[in-house]
Image (cartoon, grey):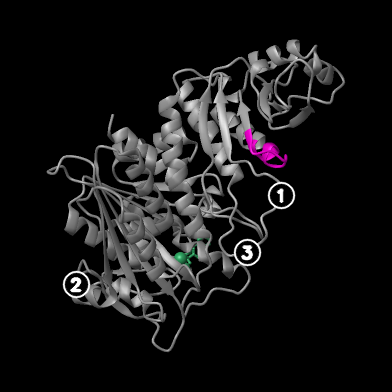
Amino acid sequence: MMTLQFSLDFAAPETVETPCLVVGVYENGLLTSAAARVDSAAGGAIKRQIESGDITGKAGSTTVLFAPEGVQAKRVLVVGLGTQKTFDGARFQKVNLEAARAIARLPIDAAVSFLAEVDVPGRDAAWRVRTAALAADHATYRYTATFKPREKSSQPELGSMTFAGADDAQAGLDQARAIAEGVHFARELANLPPNICNPAYIAEQAAQFATGQDNVSCNVLDHEEMAKLGFGSLLAVGRGSANKPKLIVLEYKGGAADEKPYAFVGKGITFDTGGISLKPGPGMEEMKFDMGGAAGVLGAFVSAVKMGLKLNLVCVVPAVENMPDGDAYRPSDVLTSLSGLTIEVLNTDAEGRLILCDALTYTAQTFRPQAMIDAATLTGACVIALGKHASGLMSKHDDLANELLSAGEDTLDRAWRLPLWDDYHAQLDSGFADVANIGGKNAGAITAGCFLSRFTEGQRWAHLDIAGTAWDEGRKGLATGRPVPLLAQWLIDRTV
Ligand code: BES
Ligand code: MN
Ligand code: ZN
């Protein structure tokens, strides 16, 4: 499925010919400037509906006026913005999402939105256009990959959005296109079922992306090569599956040849049964999203390449399936990781950290990156702590942590920091190895981060636990594409 097509327009709202014109009104009857122009051209059509109470201005509410006289547009979609005093970036994103959902229900293929003219404290026009475009793209994304081919419906589908009323926003639109491509890449990959999206499939997708891109190369290590190198921890997790592990390495050279790369590492468990420490049946299907970190870092890599960012970037994905089997690893096994540290397995369901530790060691040793960030659907505890709105951020480097927090704020793909204090490490003590793979019931997101920190000493490293943010809840839960916007923004910020 394609991303929406985006463009900019500078005409006056009442003169725009379009199947649908989108304008905003605040809660107390206050019209935005586009709404006021449309209203007066249409002889007070909007104000009348405000007076009648049909239009409330409540944030995210939508009303369609069909063929109002005096304006060129076939429809006018009036979107509630809430109260002006409390209007902020998060509200801006919400109303743009709701507007796009309303447009997508109409039998039209294009629309022109003036919502990007609305003032957002502290944000410029480029930010508004980018955020509006990404919200529209997000709201209109449809997963179609595994449905049986249907006859093309005669109902037109929204394919393009034009943003108007915002000058000097071209850079925002260009970034939106690149980020939307990365988000799509991530969502499509994560939504696929695990019988299709297995380690070899992710490797093929990465290799396919690299083919035909300048400055991008892809190298995939198979389990035999990893065995020779000593990936004892990663390979143990994969032993129960017929789908053998892969280590996917993408490199992008957009910066100077002698410049150290930035590195992303993403958890790519293509299905997490828990292994011998088997998960309960209900909800296990959600564990197809356990490669959300892999999807996220690959998507951010796609965005960086599409933007042609002037930096070097590597993306490393350990892709593994966690299954119970006669040959599966077991609780009490002691593993020797690539770093040489030994690990006592106390729970085979704490497998993400076991593949990440080797991937992080490999990335640090091979690329000596100037910063290394991993993204992983690592712990249920993180979802308990932060819910579905914020990713958990852990780092011992305040500057790196603050860079990531601010990239999250800028893209509304927000993270919240948790501590990695030494005090927590005692929970990982083992009588049989250097470290245990679980730390007990307290502070589960943090002890998982502490485990990873044992393998990243001396590195400028941060960890994003995206267990709550990588997909939406419910029966039709879909991958969100997070943290592609956060990571893409962080990279953009490294180039300015
Ligand atoms: N992939 C899961 C984490 C997860 C659980 C993500 C629920 C999203 C929703 C991870 O591999 C896991 O099973 N973690 C265990 C760790 C525990 C055994 C220490 C968990 O969170 O229960
Ligand atoms: Mn698990
Ligand atoms: Zn997992």
Q: Of marks 3 and 1, which one's residue comes earlier in the chain? A: 3
The residues tagged by marks 1 and 2 sit, at their Cα atoms, a distance apart of 56 Å
Within 10 Å of disc 1 (Cα), the crowding (few <14, some 14-19, many 20+) is few
Residue nearer the viewer, 294 or 386:
294
Residue farthest along the left direction in this orientation? 258
Within 10 Å of disc 3 (Cα), the crowding (few <14, some 14-19, many 20+) is few
Which region of the structure is painted magenta? 100-110
Residue farthest along the bottom direction in this orientation? 326
The residue drawn where x is 75% and y is 16% is: 29
Q: Does the magenta stretch include residue 108?
A: yes
Task: Please name which of the two marks, 3 or 1, marks the residue nearer to the observer.
Answer: 1
The residues tagged by marks 2 and 3 sit, at their Cα atoms, a distance apart of 44 Å
Label 1 CB less than 8 angstroms from ligand 1? no
The residue drawn where x is 25% and y is 78% is: 224
* Element carrying mark 3: loop
Residue nearer the viewer, 112 or 81:
112
As drawn, 383 above or below 323 = above
User: Of the residues shown, which amino acid type is indicated by label 2?
Assistant: Leu
Q: Of marks 1 and 2, which one's residue comes earlier in the chain? A: 1
As drawn, 382 above or below 242 = above
Query: Which numbered dot is residue 154?
Result: 1
Q: Where's residue 364, x and y in %?
A: 21, 56
Residue nearer the viewer, 480 or 154:
154
Label 2 CB less than 8 angstroms from ligand 3? no
Q: Can residue 425 be seen in this view?
A: no
Query: Which numbered dot is residue 149?
Result: 3
Residue marked by disc 2: 229
User: Of the residues shown, which amino acid type is indicated by label 1?
Assistant: Ser
Q: Of marks 2 and 3, which one's residue comes earlier in the chain? A: 3
Within 10 Å of disc 2 (Cα), the crowding (few <14, some 14-19, many 20+) is few
User: Of the residues shown, which amino acid type is indicated by label 3?
Assistant: Pro
